[in-house]
Amino acid sequence: MRHWFTLSAMGGDRPGLVAELAQLIYDCGANLEDSRMTILGTDFAVILLCSSSDAEVGDRIAAGAKQLERDHGLTILQRSLEGGERPPIPAPGTRLYRVEAVGEDRAGIVASLCRVLADRGVNITELSTHSRPGPGGAPSYEFRVIAEVPDTADVPALRASLEREGDRLVIDVALLPSTA
């Protein structure tokens, strides 16, 4: 039987953190199945999907993670996945779309656009945002989501709702088919 778990880590960025985490997983007898890593501000953040046929691997990784927390000032969270690995993306009964928005940076863009999606049963599988200097010096905000839209969803109505929210926020919003 395969045992699945996630490991997430955050802390001040420095070279070698990914190597330390990957080595821990390898040394404990687990396989690194999937991962996402980024730098936000001055912090490193990663989430790792791991698996093993050894039921004790989670305990070994937890002990090693405590050592990495002490040695490198990381905050590490480990979580067992009781149901196993998630179905592939897109999940059955859904289609992939991307939502892209751009405009002057202001509070509430992510909360508002994600609420429109959530209220229509759309599952977000990836989210990225960036604030960059824009024309004239005002910050420009870029928002990108990959989402699973149910096959039963009224896509034109979803698009119209996102565009209305974009008009309210004074940003440009687009809903487009996606392959990933």
Image (tube, helix red, strand yellow):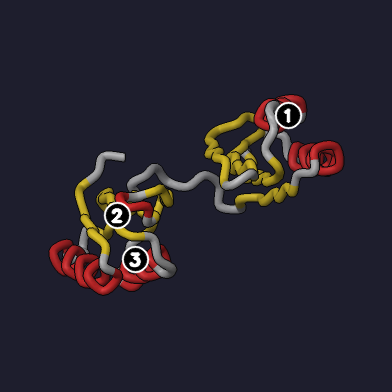
Question: In the picture, residue 107 is in which quadrant?
Answer: bottom left
Cα distance, mark 1 to mark 3? 36 Å
- Circle 2: element type: strand
| Residue 24 screen position, x and y as percent | 75, 30
| Count of numbered tags | 3
Report the side of 58 relative to 97 (left or right). right
Give the SS element for disc 1.
helix
- Foreground mark, 1 or 3, reads 3
Q: Which mark is residue 113?
A: 3
Residue type for callout 1: Glu
Q: Quadrant of residue 70?
A: top right
Q: Looking at the image, is mark 3 or mark 2 earlier in the sequence?
A: 2
Q: Residues within 10 Å of mark 2 (few under 14, many from 20)?
A: many
Q: Is residue 107 visible?
A: yes
Discs 3, 2 touching: Cβ within 8 Å: no
At x 20% / y 47%, what residue is drawn?
177
Number of the label disc, if any, that sits on residue 102 = 2
Q: Nearer the viewer, residue 118 or 2?
A: 118
- Given the image, on which type of amino acid does mark 3 rest? Leu
Quarter of the image with the N terminus is top right
Q: Position of residue 101 (x, y in %)?
A: 29, 55
26 w.r.t. 2: above or below: above
Residue at 66 percent across and 50 percent down: it is: 80
Q: Which residue is mark 1?
A: 20
